[in-house]
Image: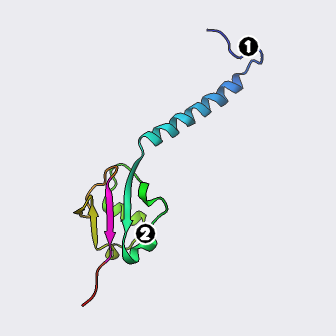
Amino acid sequence: MRNICWPIGCSKYHRHYDRAYTQIQIQLFHMMNRQTIQLKLFAVLANHTPSGADHYPIAPGMTVEQLIETLRIPQEQAKLVFVNGRKADLTDTLNADDRVGVFPPVGGG
């Protein structure tokens, strides 16, 4: 194999480029394995809506309960949760591209 660093003898440069290449590989891996959901918080919970809620990133295997904790919503305020138009339990696992709606308790008379 030909020495591509012949003019400058760059073993320290190889380490720099190897490190940068590895960082790029890690970033690409995370981008390719990134899971997002479409998140909608209703009524008084709208204050907890994060920026980028249309493509909110989640960890693989995240549950509805973990999502509510991540958003810092008290569990008693997240009374009703829908995932893809169906009522969900706190233990349900979220998947990429799910549509999640969270509603507070409804009062009235």
| In the depicted structure, whether residue 59 falls above or below residue 53 | above
Image position of 60 (left or right of 52): left
- In the rendered structure, find residue 6 and report the number of the disc placed on it: 1
Magenta-highlighted stretch: main secondary structure? strand
Number of residues whose C-alpha sits closer than 10 Å to that of mark 1, classed few (under 14), some (14–19) or many (20 or more) = few
The CA span between labels 1 and 2 is: 57 Å
Q: Is residue 88 left or right of residue 100?
A: left
- Among the 4 quarters of the image, the one containing residue 42: bottom left
Q: Position of residue 6 (x, y in %)?
A: 73, 13
Query: Is residue 20 placed above or below 69 in the rendered structure?
Result: above
Label 1's element? Answer: loop
Magenta span contains residue 80: no
Magenta-tinted stretch: 98-104
Residue drawn at point x = 31 percent, y = 51 percent: 95
Q: Could you say where residue 72 lies in the image, as x and y percent from the top left?
A: 43, 69
N-terminal of the pair, mark 1 or mark 2, is: 1
Measuring 41% from the left and 42% from the top, which residue is drawn there? 33
* Residue type marked 2: Arg
Residue shown at the point (24%, 91%) measured from the top left: 109
**Which residue type does callout 1 highlight?**
Trp
Q: Quadrant of residue 99?
A: bottom left
Residue furthest left as drawn: 86
Please name the residue that numbered disc 2 is placed on. 72
Task: Indicate the quadrant containing the N terminus: top left, top right, bottom left or bottom right.
Answer: top right
Give the side of residue 13 with respect to residue 31, left or right.
right
- Give the x, y percent position of residue 79: 28, 74
Q: Position of residue 69 (x, y in %)?
A: 39, 65
Residue found at x 72% / y 21%: 10
Checking the image for residue 77, the label placed there is none
